[in-house]
Image: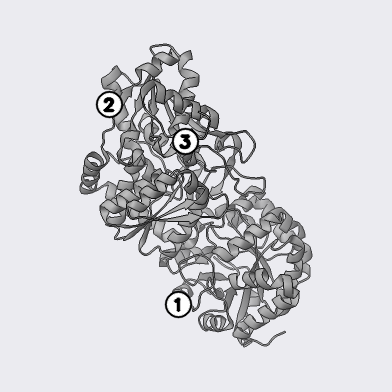
Amino acid sequence: MNLTSSNNVPDAHGRFGEFGGRYVPETLMHPVEELERAYDEARADPEFQAELDTLLKNYAGRPTPLFFAQRLTACLGGARIFLKREDLLHTGAHKINNCLGQGLLAKRMGKTRVIAETGAGQHGVATAAAAALLGLKCVVYMGEADMARQAPNVFRMRLMGAEVIPVSSGSKTLKDAVNEAMRDWVTNVETTHYLLGSALGPHPYPVMVRDFHRVIGQEVRSQVREAAGRLPDFLFACVGGGSNSIGLFYDFIPETGVKMVGVEAGGKGTALGEHAARFSGGKPGVLHGMYTYVLQTEDGLISNTHSVSAGLDYPAIGPEHAALYRQGRVEYTRVSDREALEAARLLSEQEGIIPALESAHAIAEVRKRAGAMGRDALIVVNLSGRGDKDLGIMMSSEL
Amino acid sequence: MSTLSTSRIEAALREKERGEGGKLIVYLTGGDPSIEETGKLLAAVDRGGADLIELGVPFSDPMADGPVIQRASERALRAGATLAKILARLAEWRAAVRAPIILFSYYNPVLQYGVERFARDLALAGAEGALAVDLSPEEAQNYVAALRAENLDTVFLASPTSTDERLRRVAQLSTGFLYLISRPGVTGERASLSAAVRPLAERARRFTSLPLAVGFGLSAPDQVRQAQELADAAVVGSALVRAIEEQYARGGEETIERFVRWLKSGTGSRLS
């Protein structure tokens, strides 16, 4: 894996255009500066890269296949659809890429304990696995509402030795879990690394998490050349905080012929609180250490969100996405809970692949568009996670 | 950076040097339990002897706060408190108290209100300054300029984790006083004063001649006294907010005034 940045973002202040930066209480400022230094040293160290590459290959299962979804393609009657199979990774989603990277970094920094927030539980499970593998103590914060809807993942984390702490404040979902993880970090900063799970938070998290997921786009680039002899016309990925999408998109940003679509959670309506579509419903503000698009009230209070998918149920978006939106380089759109559930069923029936409801949002957008494209058009969708964790929701949703 | 000669905060906290004993700063959340009660509570803590009042702006995601102030924030938001509503009443409240008032907020409400508009309305209300807990000195350029333009003090936090380089940066942007966080962590009461305070106060002294205040974790006169051996003022937040939560409904303003008087006894200063 190549962690060296090719585009000149972010700048020295952690800014992607006007977005990003560092908005944390003073107690955390030196720790994030230390983290930035440690990360810069690690990514320049061939030994660190080699160790990470070995774990990605032998533990996580990289490279993941790029699969031509022949029946889905025929069913939709247009563009050729390829699936990037991040769902086949160990622990069931792309999250493990970042957890192995940050886990190794935590050890390198002499930290003995990692903490994490989790929404769907995929990042929590991947953190628990990486912590078990690397001999680190692990605490995961998870909203009570999410623990109820993602119960199998709670059990997985505990089975791997992690302590899962229910968060009962606010909306009892991902944003509240981030608040609680921040409170733990500010208190235990000497011993503890905050293993943040998405491409968000104070600098250097957005760039570091992106770099650890860049391997997705790098693999796609060579795999799609091999499969089709050219670059794709479209990339699709769901966007919660934005880690799987930025991982897929990043290496294609300079390729102006490749169009990119990020799919946000449209939830059950367009009113504030009914969705997690930050670009159509939010405006720039500060949350969780960064300046970015945030769903909020007129008074600057952070809004609650809703999505059938716990992993997309978050009121802010990674700052690099905010910059890509502002530049018009990536198109961001939204699909509803219902459309995501239908797409999950479609992919299951057509290809025998049950997607995570997060990833099903990307499939739903492809379903809307592929038929209108010519048969020579080429689409790559990031299938960021598998759907086992969502079976309960699918069973109770009249699918 | 030179401090403003007109800083009422600095003057209020410097009296220690004139042999009047240490100073007490108290925090309470605006709108807890309601906007109406906040006016009464400000008057009560003023009568109790607070030398400076930090008036908190409730926020939906108070990530630097422990459970006590989180609950206060939730009560205030349920009662409909916002930055705009607090600013709309602030002139009336400020006129009724002797102690200077600074607003203590997370940055996003200030940003959405408009930094210049915030500074203007804060100055119009007669308040003395502000502290934005999640606004690092690195991101504070516009904010500091806007508040300076209105002759308002900009208070920043220094932490035991701050390096000397960071202390210098924090001190450069601070006016009124420098707020020393006694230990890494969120707000909340602790049984004893952290051993991290003394070295932090000694280091901070090298970078500023401003009054120093120690906060986070102080809850009783003993800790107020210990803090004042090292600094000019002690800040008590969660303990007062808990008193408001547990005793105000039953005991009224009298209870809160008495509570502040009790805290103030730790300063060794004569009561006015």
Q: Spatial distance from mark 2 to mark 1, Cα to Cα?
A: 58 Å
Circle 2 sits on which residue? A222
Work out whether B245 lies above or below A106: below
Question: In which quadrant is the C terminus of chain B drawn?
Answer: bottom right
Q: Name the amino acid, label 3.
A: Val
Instruction: Name the residue type under label 2.
Output: Ser
The answer for how far apart the CA atoms under marks 3 and 1 are is 47 Å
Position of residue B199 relative to residue A91, above or below, is below
Tell me which chain the residue with mark 3 is part of: A
User: Label 1: chain?
Assistant: B
Element at label 2: helix
Query: Badge 2 local density, few (<14 within 10 Å), some, or many (20+)?
Result: some
Q: CA distance from mark 2 to mark 3?
A: 23 Å
Q: Is residue A111 above or below residue A272?
A: below
Residue mark closest to the camera, 3 vs 1: 3
- Pointer 3: what residue? A239
Q: Nearer the viewer, residue A30 or A336?
A: A336
